[in-house]
Image: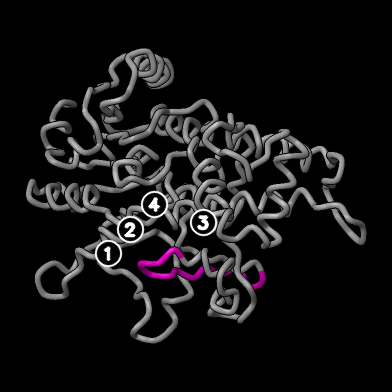
Amino acid sequence: MNITIFLGAGASAAENLPIQNELFSQYFKYILPKNKDTRMNKELTKFFKDLFFIDVTSDVDSINFPTFEEVLGVLDLAEQKRESFKNYKSESYNDNNTSISYIRQSLIMLTAYTLNNANSRSNSYHKLLLENLGKQNMLQNTTFISANYDIHIDNAIASLYDANKFPVMLNYGIDFTNFNMSKNSWQKPIEPMINLYKIHGSLNWLYCPICNSITITPYEGGVMRIIENIKQAKCLNCGELTIPIIVPPTYFKNMSNVFLSTVWNKSERALRESDILVFCGYSFPEADMHIKYLLKRVQTSRLKEKLKVIVVNNHVKKRNSLREKEKNRYERFLGKDVVYTEYSFEEFAKNPKKIIDLAK
């Protein structure tokens, strides 16, 4: 039996990472005050005041922030239409305007900074899930697809490797520049492998747009180097500066990067070969049309039996009205036979077989 586990933001929230609607408040409350005078923070402060009439240096707890989709959505539309806002142009040359592209990149770095600096460095529930999948003889038949940028599941899988006792390697499905470097660098995985496909990018991936290569920074959110130590963010292949591969939460996601395209293709292949798909901590939001498109392609062109879907996305503070709306979204798009459970990601980690067996 082949299993795919899809990890959404709720799985990371179990490790005390902020969820999407907390990113702005977390950043402006805890991170900006320590670095108010950087160009990025000055520009973000001005941007929120100009476009959303918000003073992010005031009492953040009292601010009703727009959603990430709303903020990025208006910027993406402006870029697509090649239009501008006052003081924010689609292109900024020798005037005093800030480019929309710069603000957009700053928001992506805000996301990375907030996740990387979150109070929790624990990945205990991700480790527990892997441990119990192993004990129940399900781990090596499981593929992980993650919509999260953080590296909790990455580090949990990588830490399993033991050359003698358990020589299973982490496989992202793409070739990193590190594969061509010294023996002490990240090694190209060989069978047996655990596949992890990060469809929205990752904090530990650095992309070089010059030579079209990608570097991994093992066990570290290397994207932070772009902010904190630019010299360490250079491409291992050609020495040019790298940029993050992070697809932000927006209605107009750009999936054109060659490495992301490879990851999406391999995710689709894994889902075609799966018998059971478990959504963990994922609310099936309206904005994720790329994921819905992927699922519908898989559903309608399988040679195997119908893909069985289980949803694990409950928590103690979740209102019944939200649960009902979420259940309706899943059933409306994927069919009435979706197994929508009352379990949390923490409970799934403690006994994955118990929940997976619900699909049988």
Q: Position of residue 256 (x, y in %)?
A: 61, 50
Secondary structure at badge 4 equals strand
Sequence-wise first label, 3 or 2: 3
Q: Give the residue pinned by disc 4.
A: 197
Secondary structure at badge 2 equals helix
Dot 2: few (<14), some (14–19), or many (≥20) neighbours within 10 Å?
many
Q: Give the residue pinned by disc 1.
A: 158
Mark whose residue sits in front, 4 or 2: 2
Q: Position of residue 322 (x, y in %)?
A: 39, 18
**How far, Cα to Cα, is label 4 from label 2?**
10 Å
What's the amino acid at mark 2? Asp
Secondary structure at badge 1 equals helix
Q: Which residues are magenta?
A: 210-221
Q: Which mark is residue 154?
A: 2
Sequence-wise first label, 3 or 4: 3
Tag 3 near tag 4, CB within 8 Å: no
Name the foreground residue: 12 vs 358.
12
Secondary structure at badge 3 equals helix
